[in-house]
Amino acid sequence: MESIVETVVLVAISVLGAALARRLGFIAPLVLLIAGLGLSYVPGLPEVHVEPELVLVGILPPLLYVAALQTNLVAFRKALRPILLLAVGLVLLTSFVVGFVVHALLPAVPLAACVALGAVVAPPDAVSATAIARSIGLPRRVVTILEGESLLNDATALVTVRIAVSALLGTAVGFWEISKEVALKAGGGVLLGLLFALGAAWLHRKITDPLLDDAVALLTPFVVVIIAEELHSSSVVAVVIAGLYLGHRIPYLLSATSRLQMDAVWKLINFLLEGVVFLLVGLQLRELIENIETDMATTVRVTLVVFLVLVVIRFVWMYPATYLARLIPGIRAREERPPITVPTVLAWAGMRGVVTLAAALTLPPNDTFDTGDYPRELFVFVAFAIIVLTLLIQGTTLPMLSRRLGVREDTSTEDALAEANIQHAASRAARDRLEAHADGAPDSVVERLRALTDSRSNNAWERLGNQQLETPSAAYGRLRREMITAERHVFKIARNEGRISEEVLNRAQRELDLEESQLIRSDE
């Protein structure tokens, strides 16, 4: 019972923190981190211990899976070159540079342990970067690169951590041994991800019950991760590959009801998990600080140096990765040369989060190795501090930097025009299908459906008009919402007076809710 109460309290605090962040205009992860740190000093509050398995199996998979589901696979393929340069090349470079720097600061600590720390803090977080990128209107290619980097860099970082730990244990020290382990983990992850994606797609095609459909979707990332871990493959790669494939195929696999329900469920799960995980980071900081045996001066020096190295190495990598590749004629012909402001914003978007937390918790205990000093508490604190510093410094200033450099992209008119053109074609196809199947239907029904088709097409074109004036569809939505409110009131009064049952009220409310949700969409 006590654990259930603690879980409810954590979720409630994360919801309140997210609401406060929205009210104040701050990013929610930062507010929750600060809230967690403050709560950790409240007398009588129990200490919070987060098990690595909880993050690696219970929190990280659904977050990555949802991010992969929402990623545009076509855009992802077009940006695959810069994504891989960041997700693989930059993570590996960062791991070793941080490793060598920390080893220079702490010569008694084995180099492999320092490289493990470098891998822990190397990958930026999908949650923080993309949420800010979308909210401030960064160009879509920039958002795609940040999303893709955050999806794939997790696997690079976690595999590098495991290899560094294996090197400390003396089980993977040669080039061929390391290459074999990387190939098995990454290749196995890709294969398992595809197999499970195909299996889940087959199940979705066979299932007609929306609840069962959504249950399969909810179980998919956890099943993929658990089996991938059992087979010693990269669970992160497997869940990302499965999410990318299924996200691209969802319009063909799920019914409208299933898609609506699943979208709502995943949004809620994503919202709660993101809040809880950053709150947990804050709650653990006090205990981490108290358990560090390294002196305060060394702790602060190592933390600040690692932060500076992370910032500098991302800038050093970003410009050559952006421009040197375009010296190749094929790449230059395919990709437009971006202004220098674009890689500058990409370089500053290096906020750390869930993956750094998960990787830090996987670092083995102090007594695992016999060679040299291994300050696990210091390394875990540094990782947590990097999360806080990157969110506090980079996360809060990224919108301002984007505005100052003019790295914005207003695609509202372009999107509205594209939607209007496609909606016109879709309406024409709908009318053709209506005429082909209208035999025997009442004329009033056919005319009503024709009017509905015309209305959808007109609504799309109206979004291109003067946004200061109320369009016919906006006026319709405003008036119809007033009518729906009146209808709801009558049904609720009838239920209260006992003239209708609760089931009748629920059925009527669902129909009105669905209609109102369509009105909200037409106003956007």
Image: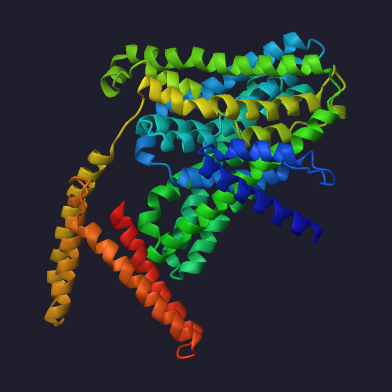
Q: Position of residue 122 (x, y in %)?
A: 60, 24
Q: Residue shown at 55%/42% (left/top)?
A: 21
**Is 141 or 171 nearer to us in this picture?**
141
Q: Residue shown at 70%/46% (left/top)?
A: 54
Number of labels in the image equals: 0
Question: In the visual, does 276 lie left or right of 291?
Answer: left
**Is 420 or 189 nearer to us in this picture?**
420
The figure's colour scheme reads rainbow
Q: Quadrant of residue 445?
A: bottom left
Q: Residue shown at 62%/35% (left/top)?
A: 355
Viewport quadrant of the N terminus? bottom right
Question: Quick check: 201 above or below 388?
Answer: below
Q: Position of residue 362 (x, y in %)?
A: 73, 35
Question: Quick check: 137 above or below 7?
Answer: above
Question: In the visual, does 228 lie left or right of 49?
Answer: left
Q: Residue furthest bottom?
A: 499
Q: Position of residue 288 (x, y in %)?
A: 79, 31
Q: Residue shown at 68%/11% (left/top)?
A: 101
**Is 11 or 339 nearer to us in this picture?**
11
Question: In the visual, does 68 lie left or right of 14?
Answer: left
Say whether residue 334 is visible.
yes
Q: Position of residue 42 (x, y in %)?
A: 80, 42
Say whether residue 426 is visible.
no
